[in-house]
Image (tube, rainbow, N blue to C red):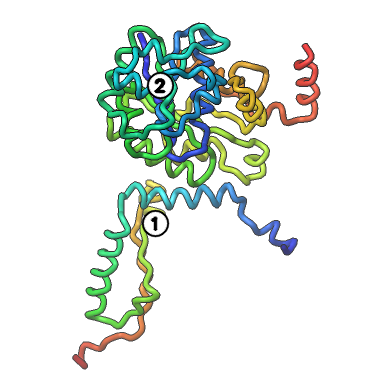
């Protein structure tokens, strides 16, 4: 049975595209057949995070307008055979696609893929409406900041009003050192306010910047963020995985341990 | 910064949480600034019949308050209305 998952946040810059790339790649690592769809028309980014920007021929708007078949527009990932990207159009705007067209497309793709992951644009306008139209479930990404949580609350309300079957939360860019000092809201604080199910928390990790620079999602590798994203993927496929201890890796001894791990 | 401030200062994580809680109460109540303005004007008109108030210093907002029951915090409409002078009914 296939599932259409939209990754959304309301606020921009909280890590939707990074999360989409890592969740999509992680699910492919778990031997699932996955297609990532960048629905941010006009501001294409997922291709760059995936390192596939040089292979684009056709895009989402071409598919929707019937200029090509979905198969022709989908780019196969560099590393995983079961992972595909359907890139967005850079020179068009959000009105080029309607929610009905998006729903039709995602329903067509269900025949061939286990997971259809939609990277949603920021905001609550047309682009957002397009992205949520065909989705079975939503992953709302937020960071432990007042503005991001406020927007997440609004998004959760809109998703409820649109009868989204399931909505889970990802708390991104958490810094346990600051939480310990009381200078950042904890995961529990965020959950207390938003009152929805947590599917994972991802630490603020400089390895994310490095992986984005290289165009290779870090999910599943030996970094804290890589582990956190892998755990999210395993929870998506239905495994019971305990929450990662995000404060690990900050101490002196674990840093030394990491040096040895890297050399292996 | 005074060294004593270090002890007095509330951790910013808690400040953020408290601010958010208040913010979301009014967000979720779906009270647009227009509606708030309308409520404010009508309250002013009612109170004006009985006393002279300082309309500049008037402050009305949706916030939370401790409930009498066990519900914890509940939304509340708080109005802070400075009175300039009481009107005496006998004079009218």
Measured from the top left, where is residue B33 in percent x and y?
32, 59
Q: Is residue A112 above or below residue B4?
A: above
Question: Residue drawn at (71%, 27%), measured in percent from left and top?
Answer: A249
Is there one chain holding both mark 1 and mark 2? no
Of A11 and A48, nearer the camera is: A48
Taking depth in this image into account, of B69 and A239 the one nearest to the observer is A239
Residue A72 position within the rendered picture, expressed as x and y whole percent measured from the top left: 40, 11
Which SS class for mark 1?
A: strand
Pointer 2: what residue? Answer: A59
Question: Which residue of the protein is positioned furthest toward the left in this rendering?
Answer: B92
Q: Looking at the image, which residue is at 76% across and 30% down?
A: A251
Q: Please give the name of the residue rendered at 76% of the width and 24% of the height, measured from the top-left corner.
A: A254
Residue A242 visible in the picture: no
Q: Chain of mark 2?
A: A
Tag 1 subunit: B
Q: Is residue A123 left or right of residue A188?
A: left
Residue B56 location in percent, x, y? 37, 76
Which residue is denoted by mark 1 in the rendering?
B63
Q: Is residue A5 above or below residue A205?
A: above
Secondary structure beneath label 2: loop
The residue that appears at 61% across and 20% down in the rendered structure is A218
Nearest the viewer among B42 and A83 is A83
């Amino acid at each position: 049975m296939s599932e259409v998952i939209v990754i959304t946040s309301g606020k921009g810059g909280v890590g939707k595209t990074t999360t989409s790339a890592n969740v999509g790649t992680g699910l492919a690592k778990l031997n699932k057949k996955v297609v990532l769809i960048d629905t941010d028309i006009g501001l294409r980014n997922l291709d760059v995070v995936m390192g596939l920007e040089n292979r684009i021929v056709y895009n989402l708007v071409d598919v929707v307008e019937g200029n090509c078949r979905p198969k022709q527009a989908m780019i196969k990932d560099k590393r995983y055979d079961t992972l595909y990207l359907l890139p967005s159009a850079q020179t068009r705007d959000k009105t080029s696609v309607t929610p009905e067209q998006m729903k039709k497309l995602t329903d067509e793709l269900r025949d061939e893929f286990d997971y259809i992951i939609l990277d949603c644009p920021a905001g609550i306008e047309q682009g957002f409406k397009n992205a949520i139209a065909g989705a079975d479930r939503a992953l709302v990404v937020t960071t432990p900041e007042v503005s991001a949580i406020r927007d997440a609350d609004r998004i959760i309300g809109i998703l409820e009003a649109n009868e989204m079957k399931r909505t889970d939360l990802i708390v991104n860019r958490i810094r346990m050192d600051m939480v310990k000092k009381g200078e950042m809201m904890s995961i529990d604080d965020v959950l207390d306010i938003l009152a929805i199910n947590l599917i994972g928390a991802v630490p603020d990790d400089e390895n994310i910047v490095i992986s984005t620079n290289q165009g290779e999602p870090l999910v599943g590798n030996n970094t804290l963020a890589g582990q956190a994203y892998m755990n999210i993927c395993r929870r998506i496929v239905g495994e019971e995985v305990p929450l990662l201890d995000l404060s690990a890796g900050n101490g002196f001894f674990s840093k030394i341990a990491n040096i040895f791990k890297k050399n292996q | 910064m005074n060294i004593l401030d270090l002890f007095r200062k509330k951790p910013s994580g808690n400040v953020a949480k408290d601010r958010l809680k208040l913010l979301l109460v009014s967000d979720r109540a779906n009270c647009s600034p227009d509606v708030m303005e309308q409520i404010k004007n009508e309250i002013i008109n009612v109170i004006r019949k009985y006393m002279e108030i300082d309309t500049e210093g008037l402050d009305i907002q949706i916030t939370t308050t401790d409930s009498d029951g066990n519900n914890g915090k509940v939304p509340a409409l708080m109005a802070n209305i400075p009175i300039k002078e009481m009107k005496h009914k006998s004079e009218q």
